[in-house]
Image: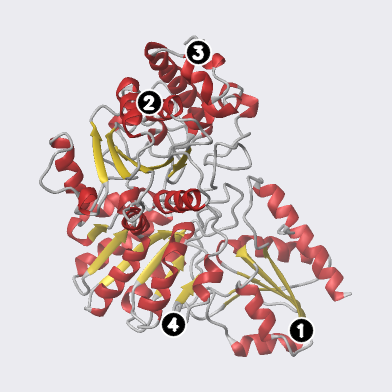
Amino acid sequence: MNLTLINKVNQPSDLKKLSIEEMEQLAAEIRTLLLKKVSQTGGHVGPNLGVVELTLAFHYVFDSPIDKIVWDVSHQSYSHKIVTGRKDAWLVEEQYKAVTGYTEPEESPHDFFTVGHTSTSVSLAVGMAKARDIKKQTGNIVAVLGDGSLSGGLALEGLNNAAELDSNLIVVLNDNEMSIAENYGGMYRNLAELRKNNGHASTNLFTAMGMDYQYVEEGNSVAEMIAAFEAVKNSSRPIVLHIHTEKGHGYIPAVANKERFHWQMPFDLKTGESKHTGSGESYDSVIIDVLDKKIKDEKQPIVAITAAIPGLFGLKELQKLHPEHYIDVGIAEQHSITYAAGLAKSGAKPIVFHSSTFLQRGYDQLSHDLGINDLPAVIIIKGGKISGGDPTHQGSFDISYITSIPNIIYLAPTSKEEVRSMLTWAIEQKEHPVAIRIPERGFVSAPIKEEIFHPLEWHVEKQGEKVAVLATGGFLSLGKKTVEKLKEHGIEATLINPRSFTYFESDLLNELQENHQVVVTLEDGSLDGGYGEKISRYYGRSDMKVLNFGALKRFNHHQTMEELFTEFRLLPELITEDVLEALN
């Protein structure tokens, strides 16, 4: 396709010079750019294809950055970036990594927040509107909700407060009938009714909250979106502009499979087929197998809960096998934990599935509802690892925040056999909440050597002297390589798999003092508040030297894992250097 118009657009004001026909052509050119890049790099496909017209219309009608747009999650801001001076990150392959996949104020004055979690836009916009009013400034404030963000409690809290504003605030509800997966929850029935009746229905969630309301059926029409934005521009009261769009619009594979193309690895542009296909057994399949058998046993009423991310855990397979035992609560991490507490209190066995970076949103519920009440729910956590990606999606902090809460047992399996055994134990025990951190450094199969396995018993992988390496979870392989490297220097080190971030074998720790001088801890997460600090504290009054290896407490910005592991000295040769220095 000849990209004639995109070359004329270097800033939002350039759009105002185009006709409607040219804007439609520009939308097509932008889709071509979006698909070319994400097919090679991976990224959020469907969300961005669906908001091209919305984005162009906003920048045609409004005057950014005086008029401000706040993108919820901001994973749908690719078109926005293209027309706000960052198009080379899509035009030039060598610059594909020049911008982030989310809004980033350091990149442009047209971005206002670094945002990567859902349901935040309305609260952020309400704050901006209030600040504008107090400072007696002008300008429109626009929040864009989409991809199921309305199901997050924070969005409703923001809307509730927005209704109290007596000034300009425009909430764009980008209704593409989807979350990451299907929408779940009663409010979406009201949205369906509003769509069916072109915005006119006996029940209207938004007017009931005190907001003004308008509906746009053709949200993928530049002309319709321009007219809609012109109608609400400079409104003197908070208003919800409910627009109906198609997720994945303009690309048949993304429309046909909206969930898979919400975020996709690199794929073949012609067929839509992924270039990276999984093969063989996975931790997901191990977990589904355990749950399938336990549900069939009928000894416990198991309920699997996801907060809108079933694809991350392969839960659609469990839904097919046992639909009555599967619940998607929508993008509501807090509710998922407290819901699980209610289930556990009433004799059911909830298994809640979360990513490390999303579960932090339920911290209070982990503490107040599960921890204080000591209820035996099970939480499966993926993505818990040192992350070099966008700062909004960091998996480094779950060890710190979960182990800070009393009563929760946090297990650290190292293999499929330990995942299977720990999950089975967690389901059968009735004393405490149990979280299980799924390893993130490759799929490992290693037979359990004990006749009777208990997840709270440390396992000595290799007995040695002088140096003991405590390697947790997915870092057991790093521990093995470090022990081998130490052997090259004449040190037969001890290697221990602790299997848990919350339980300590005092007798074994005391025994190490008899013939060891240095204890090394390895954890795939932040050192501050982490596992290693607890071991250091245990040995605080002794002569034992403790070296902690993990990540610095910070939000990483797109460093490679090689860069991070070198900086954090998480390489066998660098760990060995530090151990030799400590011994000398």
Residue count near mark 3 (Cα–Cα under 10 Å), binned few <14, some 14–19, many ≥20: some
- C-alpha gap between disc 1 and disc 2: 64 Å
Q: Determine whether 145 is above or below 232 in the image.
A: below
Badge 4, how many Cα within 10 Å: few under 14, some, many 20+? Answer: many
Left or right: 83 as drawn, with respect to 237: right
Quick one: label 1, few (<14), some, or many (20+) residues within 10 Å?
Answer: some
First in residue order: circle 4 vs circle 1 = 4
Which of the 4 quarters of the picture holds residue 538?
Answer: bottom right
- Between 303 and 48, the one nearer to me in the picture: 48
Residues under labels 2 and 3: Cα distance? Answer: 15 Å
> As shown in the figure, which amino acid type bears the numbered disc 4?
Asn
Residue bearing the label numbered 3: 5
Q: How far from the left and from the top, in percent, is residue 28?
A: 41, 18
Residue of label 4: 407
Disc ID at residue 544: 1
Camera-near label (4 vs 1) is: 4
Classify mark 1: helix, strand or loop: loop
Image quarter where the C terminus lies is bottom right
Q: Residue furthest right?
A: 584
Amino acid type at image mark 1: Met
Q: Which residue is mark 2?
A: 53
The answer to whether one can see residue 488 in this image is: no
**For the residue marked with disc 3, what is the amino acid?**
Leu
